[in-house]
């Protein structure tokens, strides 16, 4: 292979690749970072500079880049079966993964339907919910509700339940926009309210909405415990517990979008466990393959599955993707689950989180830092800054200090891979503090 350098890679990429979630013109001022290789929590560019991956490469990587165990599992799978269609065919990795997810998930979620990315999982859950109601004689139940500032993906169906104006506004006329209810985001609580009281006040608003609209509502879709794209908005589990009761009472499905928060990110394997609930649909993607390959899964219960089980083709769930249940992706997911078990990752993460919280005391105490918060392996805070382009500046300064940080507005967050070491956490905090100092 030809030896490349950063400059040449940037030039080639900007002329041929249309990058996601980007205004391409901004790359004139904030250059692209070509990445040559990754190892553990680090990414390396073509000039030999390194970056600590504090955002797990868009919230997907759990056990580091180039993880030897996942690499080995994939190599072995490559020699056996790279892909076969899942309609009319099956294979060991997809069966084993479905069985193991069933064992791990909240009780009752015994049926796994696969997609290739998070947005597809959202689409699948919305379609499955509405189709369930139609098959059950409630053809009017075709609407959905989500929380304010929710994010469930960017395809047209997923955008209809996504409340991020920047992603949605240009496509408003293409979307059947769904209603939202107020978010239990702790930051929105009144000064005299605890986070739990506020969560219950929000649940009451949900109750009023359900009372009025349940006859047309198929499902509530929600990001349990942390609304990621809303700026790592965290909330009390009492909201979820109450939402489960209300959905049962009013005959509305509860869709738990654990695409970002599942796979141990919030401290339990699934965020729903902290509210002691079983959703009607549980969505997983992002971390499920350890950040290796695109895969998503919608888990659901037998009562929903049975409503599709009939002689007529049209009652079945007619949805598919070319790569549904891809064997390589499923094998990466199985290797990921093996690591969780053998390394007792959830227990180890509790110690790591405590360690980072200890190390981060000076950052938390910085006068420009507001709303310091932590759930499991996610940390976030707002920065009081005079710069309106804080996110870009923080990103650029981060790179100069060997950190990959990707703030959302003036919210800085850490969502590191679980293999991050104490020394790496120290480096992350010290340098972030330095950057905050420079930008305030
Ligand atoms: C990332 C994300 C999605 C969309 O997943 P993609 O793979 O990017 O389509 C949906 N919901 C949540 C909560 C997410 O964080």
Image: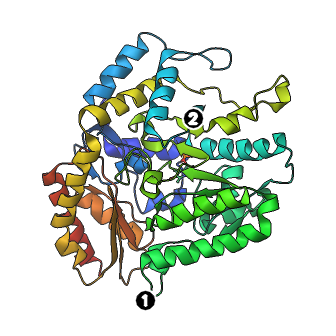
Whether 64 is drawn above or below 179: the answer is above
Q: Which quadrant is home to the C terminus?
A: bottom left
Q: Which quadrant is home to the N terminus?
A: top left
* Pointer 2 or 1: first along the chain: 2
Residue located 41% across and 46% down the image:
10
Q: Is residue 9 visible?
A: yes
In the drawing, does residue 326 fall left or right of residue 439?
right
Q: Position of residue 85 (x, y in %)?
A: 63, 18
Q: Quadrant of residue 3?
A: top left
Of the numbered discs in the image, which one, if any, rests on residue 120?
none
Q: Quadrant of residue 213?
A: bottom right
Mark 2 secondary-structure assignment:
loop
Q: Position of residue 329 (x, y in %)?
A: 47, 28
Q: Nearer the viewer, residue 113 or 292?
A: 113
Residue located 35% across and 82% down the image:
384
Whether 313 is drawn above or below 438: the answer is above
Q: Which residue bears the numbered disc 1?
A: 191
- Classify mark 1 as within 8 Å of ligand 1 or not, answering yes or no: no
Q: Which residue bears the numbered disc 2?
A: 116
Q: CA distance from mark 2 to mark 1?
A: 43 Å
Residue located 22% across and 46% down the image:
348
Mark 1 secondary-structure assignment:
loop
Q: Position of residue 364 (x, y in %)?
A: 24, 75
Whether 389 is drawn above or below 140: the answer is below
Total marks in image: 2
């Amino acid at each position: 292979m030809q030896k490349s350098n950063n400059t040449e890679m940037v030039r080639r990429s900007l002329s041929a690749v249309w990058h996601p979630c980007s205004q391409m013109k901004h790359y004139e001022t904030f250059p692209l970072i070509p990445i040559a290789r990754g190892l553990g929590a680090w990414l390396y560019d073509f000039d030999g500079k390194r970056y600590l991956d504090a955002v797990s490469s868009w919230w997907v990587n759990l056990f580091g880049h180039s993880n030897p165990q996942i690499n080995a599992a994939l190599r072995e799978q490559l020699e056996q079966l790279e892909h076969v269609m899942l309609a009319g065919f099956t294979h060991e990795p997809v069966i084993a993964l479905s069985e193991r997810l069933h064992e791990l998930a909240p009780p009752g979620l015994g049926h796994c339907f696969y997609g290739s990315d998070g947005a597809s999982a959202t689409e699948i859950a919305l379609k499955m919910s509405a189709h369930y109601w139609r098959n059950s004689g409630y053809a009017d139940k075709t609407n959905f509700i989500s929380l304010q500032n929710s994010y469930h993906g960017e395809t047209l169906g997923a955008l209809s339940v996504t409340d991020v104006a920047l992603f949605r506004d240009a496509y408003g006329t293409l979307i059947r926009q769904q209603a939202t209810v107020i978010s239990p985001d702790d930051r929105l609580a009144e000064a005299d309210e605890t986070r739990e009281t506020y969560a219950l006040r929000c649940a009451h608003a949900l109750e009023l909405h359900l009372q009025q609209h349940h006859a047309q509502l198929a499902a509530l879709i929600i990001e349990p415990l942390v609304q990621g794209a809303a700026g790592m908005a965290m909330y009390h589990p009492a909201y979820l517990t109450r939402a489960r009761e209300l959905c049962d009472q009013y005959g509305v499905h509860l869709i738990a979008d654990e695409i970002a928060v599942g796979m141990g990110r919030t401290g339990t394997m699934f965020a729903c466990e902290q509210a002691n609930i079983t959703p009607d649909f549980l969505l997983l993607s992002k971390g499920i393959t350890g950040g290796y390959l695109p895969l998503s899964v919608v888990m659901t219960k037998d009562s929903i599955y049975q409503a599709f089980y009939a002689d007529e083709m049209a009652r079945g769930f007619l949805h598919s993707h070319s790569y549904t249940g891809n064997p390589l992706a499923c094998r990466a997911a199985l290797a990921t689950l093996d690591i969780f078990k053998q390394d007792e990752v959830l227990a180890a993460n509790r110690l790591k989180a405590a360690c980072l919280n200890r190390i981060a005391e000076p950052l938390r105490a910085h006068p420009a830092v507001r709303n310091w918060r932590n759930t499991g392996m996610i940390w976030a805070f707002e920065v009081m800054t005079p710069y309106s382009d804080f996110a870009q500046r923080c990103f650029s300064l981060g790179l100069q200090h060997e950190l990959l940080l990707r703030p959302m507005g003036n919210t800085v967050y850490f969502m590191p891979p679980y293999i991050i070491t104490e020394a790496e956490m120290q480096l992350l905090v010290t340098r972030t503090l330095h950057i905050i100092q420079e930008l305030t």
